[in-house]
């Protein structure tokens, strides 16, 4: 399953499928990007990050891809599990000197069907 | 290791009342920030601090004050609450300037 565009807030996939969550960022000067996962009633949790000098970074079951040409970020989750159901946010750091000043996207609700 | 601790978890206020949301971290992080989360709008930065004694405004600072007298604590004050401030508030901290943010569990505020 794949989400497209900024304004598709939900993505529904079958357990075991791969998920792709997309995000467009606005500032070409942003140099650091993070994906966060937020489960219901909890604070966001770090998943994976990538700096602008990289195109791809892999973690455990997750991969982040960065396309600076079109200012696009994606999160790929392999073999999606019910525990992956959550809202996923991309965030960009627009100001290196300010610290803790990440700007968040609107989020995508991922639902994994058993 | 408690991480980032926010209190209270829930609060109901009447318009015009004041209150303080508390935030404490035990990771010796220099950078702390407050976000609010509203439905369909993601997280928006209210205020942030790059170290004790230093604070600055974020995207939506109006109606909120902060101070940073110690590295550990970063309280958020609402001087005169308004219904538009009904939201879920998250405090976060990070070690480096552009590093991973660690979030608290959130404080749900309702202003009647």
Image (cartoon, helix red, strand yellow):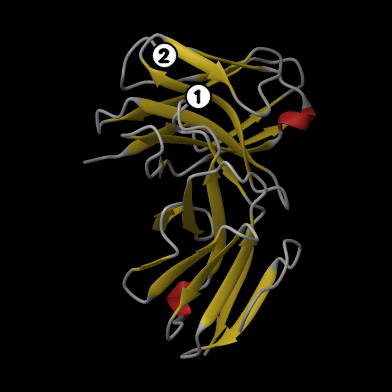
Identify the residue at image location x=73%, y=53%.
Answer: B40
Q: Residue furthest left?
A: B1
Q: Quadrant of residue A87?
A: bottom right
The residue pinned by badge 1 equals B48
Q: Which mark is residue B68?
A: 2
Same chain shared by disc 2 and disc 1? yes
Identify which residue is drawn at 42% across, 53% down.
A53
Tell me if residue B87 comes above or below residue A42 in the rendering.
Answer: above
Q: Secondary structure at mark 2?
A: loop
Residue B79: quarter of image: top right
- Disc 1, SS: strand
Packing grade of label 2 (10 A; few <14, some 14-19, many >=20) is some
How many numbered marks, from 0 up?
A: 2
| Mark 2 to mark 1 CA distance (whole Å) | 9 Å
Identify the image quadrant of the N terminus of chain B: top left
- Relative to residue A11, is residue B77 depicted above or below? above
Q: Chain of mark 1?
A: B
Who is closer to the viewer here, B19 or A91? A91
* Residue B51 shown left or right of residue B40 in the figure: left
Task: Kindly identify which chain the residue marked by label 2 belongs to.
Answer: B
Q: Nearer the viewer, residue A8 or B91?
A: A8
- Report if the CB atoms under discs 2 and 1 are less than 8 Å apart: no
Is residue A80 visible to the viewer in this orientation of the structure?
yes
């Amino acid at each position: 399953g794949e989400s497209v565009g900024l304004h598709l807030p939900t993505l529904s996939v079958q357990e075991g499928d791969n998920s792709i969550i997309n995000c467009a960022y606005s500032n070409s000067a942003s140099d650091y990007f993070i994906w966060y996962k937020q489960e219901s009633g909890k604070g966001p949790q770090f998943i994976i990050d990538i700096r602008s000098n990289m195109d791809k970074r892999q973690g455990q079951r997750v991969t982040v891809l960065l396309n600076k040409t079109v200012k696009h970020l994606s999160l790929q989750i392999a073999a999606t599990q019910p525990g992956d159901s959550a809202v996923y946010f991309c965030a960009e750091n627009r100001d290196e000197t300010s610290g803790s000043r990440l700007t968040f996207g609107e989020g995508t609700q991922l639902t994994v069907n058993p | 290791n408690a991480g980032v601790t926010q209190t209270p978890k829930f609060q109901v206020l009447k318009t015009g009342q004041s209150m303080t949301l508390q935030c404490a971290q035990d990771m010796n992080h220099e950078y702390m920030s407050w976000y609010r989360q509203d439905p369909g709008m993601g997280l928006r930065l209210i205020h942030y601090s790059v170290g004790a004694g230093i604070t600055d405004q974020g995207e939506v600072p109006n109606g909120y004050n902060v101070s940073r007298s110690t590295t550990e604590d970063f309280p958020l004050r609402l001087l005169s609450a308004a219904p538009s401030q009904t939201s879920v508030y998250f405090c976060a901290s990070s070690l480096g300037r552009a590093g991973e943010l660690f979030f608290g569990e959130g404080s749900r505020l309702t202003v009647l």
